Image: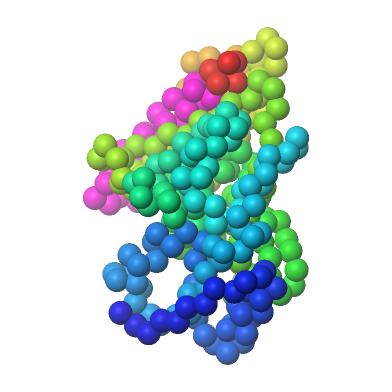
Amino acid sequence: MGDYAYAAPATVDSTVELLSSSANSGTRTQVLAGGTDVLVQMRSTDRGARLIVDIKQLAETNVLSVGEDEIYIGAAIPSAILNENAELKGLLPGLIESADLIGSTQIQGRASIGGNLCNSSPAGDTIPALIANSAVCHIVGADGERDVPVEDFVTGVGTNCMAPHEFLLGLRVPTPKGNTGDAYLRFIPRTEMDIAVAGAGVRLTLDDSGACTAARVGIGAVAPTALVVSEAADALIGTQVDDDALNAAADACSAAASPISDKRGTVEYRIKVVGVLCKRAGAIARDRAKA
């Protein structure tokens, strides 16, 4: 392993100042929001020296609020905290279920949705669920604050849109209104604690007759980044979310996928499975919207 330094700034401003000065001096930094991937990376694929900047103690990264129009989830809030929040589980069951898939109970004591997003893995479980829920990244840096839709945040395998002086403060998620439901499903080779072969998140809103008035679909592990699939949403809107509509959405997800073959699955397998997951997640989201 290489040489490492550690800092835990006390304020957002001092964090930005540290990141900016490090960038100007050419010092590599790695922001720690959850930290569950850091040791794995340092001991295997990425042993380079760096300054680890811990943001878990910042008050702003630990904000959790549920408003009439917006839910705010701080970037460093552990999944275990979210998993035990009855209000969030009622409003965003699919998103919370995606967080509950990350590691064991012990890991979830530190792992965060924000960290999972910033790790920027194509197979990050929370990312398709965030996309389905129209989540927006709240980013702060030397140039101030900005918001970026989750589907535009990850730019490639392990990369994202943030500059070296920026970090993720939290996530803004529209508060679901009546007759809205979401769901996330993934397929893994083992029964638990594995990396997704494919994943799909769906959020639906129905009118009083059961017709779909709004939809969002996100898929993961089948392209270099998680994708929003507008064609799948279009296939659901205006329908009763019956089998024909769900099959059309599934076909759209399969068509949007551009996976690779690896030890977990072939290209052909992933393309098929992501469609199946979309159909099943869509049916769950529909039933939750009706409940």
Say which of 63 and 132 sits in front.
63
User: Would residue 156 be visible to someone looking at this image?
Assistant: no
Residue 90 position (above or below residue 129): above
Q: Which residue: 68% across, 65% down?
A: 140
**Residue 284 seen in the figure:** yes
Q: Residue at x 67, y 31 (%)?
A: 176
Residue 166 occupies quadrant: bottom right
Residue 260: give x, y in percent of width and height: 35, 51
Q: On the rendered image, what quadrant is the N terminus found in?
A: bottom left
Q: Which residues are magenta?
A: 258-286
Specify the color scheme: rainbow
Between 97 and 263, the one lying in front of the other is 97
Magenta run includes residue 266: yes
Position above or below: 160 against 112: below
Q: Residue at point 50% right, 57% down?
A: 115
Q: Quadrant of residue 75?
A: bottom right
Q: Main secondary structure of the magenta part?
A: helix
Judge from the rendering whether residue 49 lies leftward or rightward of residue 151; answer left or right.
left
